[in-house]
Structure formats: C-alpha cells, structure tokens
Image (cartoon, helix red, strand yellow):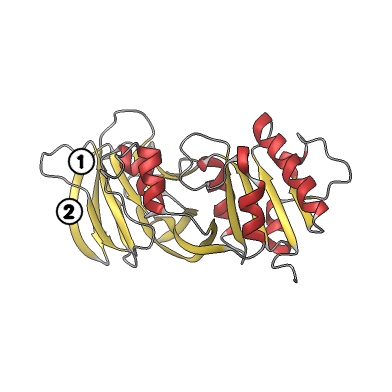
Amino acid sequence: MAQLYKTIGLIGKPNHQGASSTIAVLHDYLLENKYEVLVETSVANSVEIADMHECSLTEIGNKADLAIVVGGDGYMLGAARVLACFDIGVIGVNRGNLGFLTDLSPDDIIPPLEEILNGKSRYEQRFIIEAEVYRHGKLKSSNSAVNEAVLHAGKVASMIEFEVHIDNSFMFSQRSDGLIISTPTGSTAYSMSAGGPILTPNLNALSLVPMFPHTLTSRPIVVDGDSEIKLILANENQESLQVSCDGHVILAVMPGDEVIIKKSPQTIRLVHPLNHDYFNVLRNKLGWGNKLY
C-alpha cells in the first residue's frame, strides 16, 4: 500500500529530556518504515541522532506532509501559529500538563501513530484569529493567535478603559483589567480560568470575557466567529498597554489606539486517532464525573 505521508517533520520542546527521548524514538521508528524525517533545528541540538536532517519550522511547513509536535499545549500553540501558513497536518504528543491539543501519550505512542500513518485517523480544522494594532489609522503591528488575544495593562492590577465595537456597532464601554477574546480552541485555556464558557471546537464563534470588570453587570458574551471586534482605547489610559497573543507574542498599545481582532483566513489541520472524543478529553482533563451506570 502506498504511503499516505512521505515526509514527516518532528518538532519538540528544546532541552526537555522527555521531549528529546520521544523525538529519538519517533525518528528511529519513522526511518525504519521508510519515511523521510525532518527534525526542527531547535530540538535537533538536544537530541543525539546520527545523520539527522535538520530544518527550520518554516522549512518543515514547506516540505513535510505531516508534523508531529512533542511538548505541552504551549509549545503546540507556538508551532501551530507558524504551521497554519502551510497545508500540513499536525499531531500532538503530550509532554506537558493538561494537554488539550496533544492527543498521543509518549508512553504508548507507536500503535496509535501507526494507525494514523495508515490512514485510520480523523481531521479537524481549527480557525485562528488575527490581532492588529492601528495608530492614527495606520497599522503598527499584528500577529495571530490560536487560543486568545488579550488586551491588558503592562502591570498587574491596573485598570484600563476601552470601548468594544462588533462589526462597527458599539457594544459597550468598560473599565476593567482587560478583555480576553477567545477562539473555541482557547476556550479551555485562559478564558476558562477567567470564567468564560467552553466552546466546542466545531463552533464558529468567539467569546469575549472581561477581566475583573468594575461593574456587577458585566458578563462573558459569545459572538459570531466571522465578527470583526474593534477595541478603542481611551486617551486617559496609561501608556503601558498590551495585546498578548497566546501569552507569547506581545503587541504594544498606546492610549487612543484601535485594536482589530478577526478570524484569520488560515486554519490549523489537526490529526486525531479514530477514537478521539472531545468530550472524553474534557472529562479526563477537568475531572468531570463519568456515567452513572
């Protein structure tokens, strides 16, 4: 039978003993089964493998048919933001804590991976969002987020004031510590910790979750995923404001700036084992009760 995938990229958390050992196991298995294997440069430096083919993350996106990311959800997010630019499937191996995005266990990785490589798998497209900062009508900075974009002050417990517009319709003004705009993927991350709703991955929706609002009537709200969300920063704010994308990329924001958040045309193609069940993941990760009978 012809191989469904020919070239596979291995991406992992650098200088992490567990990730390095898993990368080595995967590399040996894939080579033995006649796959071309590319190892991302940052993790290649911490893995002792002879005749290794090192590549950058973007080169893996360009050349590989499938990427296997070894690490926690945080590392998976960083790789996914880059790989969303390419037509490539992504599998996660959990070497972190909760692991909502990383399906495979490093303790039992080969049997489910073998099934996936033989085509016994399911695909899932997850959308991502773009955050753009405009100053006096000119684009100053932008980046993408898989989980969430968060408007917040540069220092802890500092209240900011801003307006929220949805598709150019004024929604509300608010004084709070900030606002979390979350995708369904990110609804089990920072948004959930702040009291936001869990959105199933197939929903075309975004949630807006206020952070410690200075009012008792402010509540999270879910809007259409194709909405354009505009945040207008009051001129009275202090200068140290930020928009954080997935907690990693920071965009500087000044008083009076406008922040536009909308769905990106790019998506992430996640590859799951056939027995993957989203509600089973939630139940296990969040400690929900099992069936009564």
The residue drawn where x is 25% and y is 34% is: 159
Quarter-of-image position of residue 237: top left
Residue under label 1: 175
> Residue lying farthest bottom?
2
* Left or right: 213, with 134 as reference point: left
- Image quadrant holding the C terminus, namely top left
The residue located at (64%, 53%) in the rendering is 113
Q: Is residue 183 above or below residue 218?
A: below
Viewer-proximal residue, 70 or 263?
Answer: 70
- Disc 2 marks which residue? 172
Position of 15 compared to 266: left or right? right
> Furthest residue to the left?
217
Badge 2: residue crowd in 10 Å (few <14, some 14–19, many ≥20): few
Task: Give amino acid for label 2.
Answer: Phe
Q: Is residue 287 left or right of residue 24?
A: left
> Which residue lies at the image location 61% right of the left edge and 42% below the top edge?
108
